[in-house]
Amino acid sequence: MIAVLGLLAGVVVGLLLKPDVPTPFVPYLPIAVVAALDAVFGALRAFLDGIFDDKVFVVSFVSNVLIAAAIVFLGDKLGVGGQLTTGVIVVLGIRIFSNAAAIRRHVFHA
């Protein structure tokens, strides 16, 4: 519950302060957001399954963002940034939709 409150507080602070993202980090922002959403949907699914652990959520959240950003950074350095970015988005998108389907089954008992 503390993690969810922290996440909501972070979103509110971000909306109020409207921080500027430095230009070199702009390509990584969408990847970081999708990776963070994957962790949030995974946490919600774990909560509904009764196996949620806040430590696992924090580690998953941070590691998802760092690993996704590292893959995109490596792709940029190799000159294939677009392909690796697309790959990361596809993989994380599949995970998000898989978790969303499990959440929907929990909510609607279908």
Image: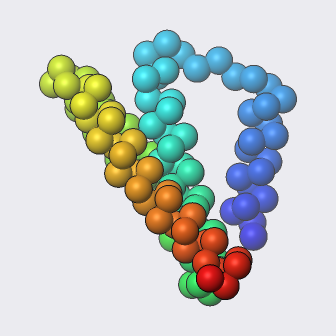
Image quadrant containing the N terminus: bottom right
Q: Position of residue 68 (x, y in %)?
A: 37, 43
Q: Is residue 30 above or below residue 103?
A: above
Quarter of image, res 76: top left
Q: Which percent across, then down, holds residue 71?
A: 28, 39
**Most extreme residue toward the front, as rendered?**
110
Lateral position of residue 81 relative to residue 60, left or right: left
Q: Residue at position x 57%, y 64% from top?
A: 100
Q: Is residue 42 left or right of residue 13?
A: left
Total number of numbered labels?
A: 0
Rendering quarter of residue 58? bottom right
x, y percentage for residue 80?
Answer: 19, 25
Residue drawn at (81%, 40%) of the image: 12
Report whether 15 appears left or right of 76.
Answer: right
Q: 100 or 63: which is nearer to us? A: 100
Q: Quadrant of residue 6?
A: bottom right
Q: Is residue 47 visible?
A: yes
Quarter of the image where the C terminus is located: bottom right
- Residue 55 in sight from this viewpoint: no
In terms of depth relative to the viewer, which is nearer, 78 or 91? 91
